Amino acid sequence: MTNIPRPEWDHPYLHTRQELSRQQLEAFAYHYFLKFLMFFRDQPEGSIRPGLEIKYSAKMKHKLGLADLFNHNIRLNYNYFRKDPALLPYTLFHEMIHIWLYNCDLDPGHTRRFYFKMKFFEATKLPIDQKVHIHKRVASEAKFVFTCPNCKNKWFTNSPKEDKRLYCGFCYEQSKEKYYPVKFTNHNRHSLGNL
Ligand SMILES: [Zn+2]
Ligand SMILES: [Zn+2]
């Protein structure tokens, strides 16, 4: 099934047969990033943090995109998208959901809430990555969130135990100091009921 994008979501590069330059790709990603922001700002769950960086990586092999939650950036597969940019909006939206959920203190994984948000993308009729769809699984959200008292990075888990052997690897790398994550209750978690 081929989707035909709704006119306001269309872009000439979606139909190009030519290889795109890095500059064109950057403009393309930025165009969709700006348009998608309306789904990730002032939502009942919260907003994506400002300053999100979108970059292309020539090192990515197997994935089309990657959300770096700790460093607040999204990396896109340069060698894939320069030849075929049709799935770029899908990939970008997917990774933006991960970042947005994380910024809202919600489980950033492929949960039911994640796929509920994906429905907003489906309404644009932009091309969808069928491969990702096949692997679609509906997971429930992690019950607990732990946060590093120093850098505020978060971990999501179903285990309520505060494991004293686990310390923040990010901070340890920077300062060789061991910061132990602290559990906090996630009030956002049930805001959408039995989604
Ligand atoms: Zn994902
Ligand atoms: Zn830390």
Image (cartoon, helix red, strand yellow):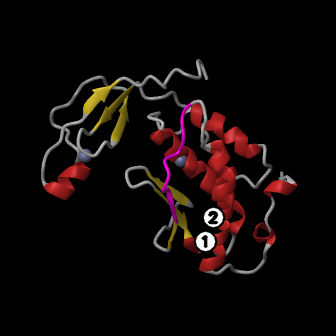
Q: Please give the label number shown on residue 26.
A: 1
Which residue is found at the position 59% from the left and 23% from the top? Answer: 192
Q: Residue furthest left?
A: 177
> Is the residue 108 above or below the residue 20 in the image?
above
Pick whichever, 176 or 43, lies toward us.
Answer: 43
Q: Quadrant of the C terminus?
A: top right
For label 1, count other residues whose C-alpha is less than 10 Å away and answer few (under 14), some (14-19) or many (20+): some
Horizontal side, residue 59 vs residue 164: left or right: right
Amino acid carrying label 1: it is Glu
Q: Please report contact status of discs 1 and 2: CB closer than 8 Å, yes or no.
A: yes
Is the shortest distance between ligand 1 and the CB of mark 2 under 8 Å? no
Amino acid on which the number 2 mark rests in the picture: Tyr
Between 143 and 152, the one lying in front of the other is 152
Which span is picked out in magenta?
45-54
Residue 66's tag is: none
Q: Residue at x 58, y 37 (%)?
A: 114
Mark 2 surroundings: few (<14), some (14-19) or many (≥20) residues within 10 A = some
Mark identifier at residue 30: 2
**In this view, 11 is above or below 125:** below
Question: Is residue 2 visible to the viewer in this orientation of the structure?
Answer: no
Seen at 69% across and 68% down, the residue is: 85
As for residue 53 lying within the magenta part, the answer is yes
Residue 117 placement (x, y as % from top left): 64, 38
* Apparent side of residue 3 relative to residue 145 in the rendered image (left or right): right
Kindly tell me whether mark 1's CB lies below 8 Å from ligand 1.
no
**Residue at image coords 56%, 49%:** 96
- Mark 1 lies on a secondary structure that is helix
Residue 89 x/y as whole percent: 68, 58
What predominant SS class does the magenta segment belong to? Answer: loop
Instruction: Determine the CA span between mark 1 and mark 2.
Output: 6 Å
| Residue 50 x, y percent position in the rendering | 50, 52
